[in-house]
Amino acid sequence: MPIDTLLVFVGAYDDVADAEADYQLVKELHTEAGLIDGYDAAVIERRDAGKTKIVKKHETPTRAGGVLGGGIGLATGLVVALFPFAAIGGGLLVGTTAGGAILGAVAGHAAAGMSRHDLKELGEHLDAGQAGLVVVAVADMGAKVQRAMKRAATVQQKQLKADHSEIERDAAAASDTVK
């Protein structure tokens, strides 16, 4: 099974506007490179009582077929693995039980593709700001993505290993079990 090694970039921001501005730069960077389907990104906002909400996201439309193309990708999965309430606060679970099952499968794979230590560090890093930007990108774009996140107070980079065909299968199976 092909395992892709991707890079995760997590930026902590003082406000959502700066995170959204860098999100736009990352999007433009991938658009100009012809790699619009080569990354996932999510902007998060910390709210009252430590709750986290996903306020903007880009999910790869073609990386892994229909299930992931339906709007749930590795950046969203990683945010939900770090901050489970983000699924509720971001409206990701509205509508269907199948959507929650698919999100759970993707979040599980995103978390499994990293060490527990790296996940803990990323969560603590995001806790330092009022907003955050999570980008999952192909390794070739790493330096450019990091430069594009220029408004971040700090940026951390970690490696994520993912088997997209396995994620697709597990998400499909999760969807089938709730039907």
Image (spheres, rainbow, N blue to C red):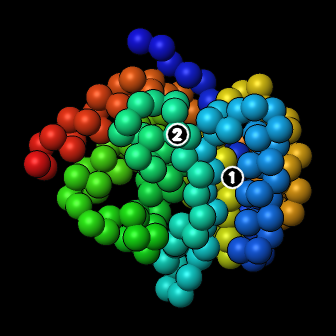
Q: Position of residue 153 (x, y in %)?
A: 83, 64
Which numbered dot is residue 90? none
Residue 53 to residue 112: above or below: below
**Camera-nearest label, 2 or 1:** 2
Secondary structure type for disc 1: strand
Choose top left, top right, bottom left or bottom right for residue 174. top left
- Evaluate whether residue 66 shows in this view: yes
Residue under the image location 69 percent in, 52 percent down:
10
Farthest top residue? 1
Label 1: few (<14), some or many (≥20) within 10 Å? many
Mark 2 lies on residue: 61
Find the distance from the CA under tag 2 to the CA under tag 1: 21 Å
Mark 1 lies on residue: 10
Q: Nearer the viewer, residue 130 or 166?
A: 166
Q: Quadrant of the N terminus?
A: top left
Q: Nearer the viewer, residue 63 or 140?
A: 63
Side of 99 where 31 appears, left or right:
right
Residue under the image location 35 percent in, 51 percent down:
103
Residue 27 to residue 158: above or below: below
Amino acid type at circle 1 is Val
Q: Position of residue 160 (x, y in %)?
A: 57, 33
- Evaluate whether residue 114 shows in this view: no
Secondary structure type for disc 2: loop
Residue under the image location 35 percent in, 25 percent down:
166
Residue 55 to residue 5: above or below: below
Mark closest to the chain's N terminus, 2 or 1: 1
Q: Position of residue 177 (x, y in %)?
A: 12, 43
Label 2: few (<14), some or many (≥20) within 10 Å? many
Amino acid type at circle 2 is Pro
Residue under the image location 43 percent in, 74 percent down:
89
Q: Tell how many labels.
A: 2
Q: Position of residue 75 (x, y in %)?
A: 55, 48
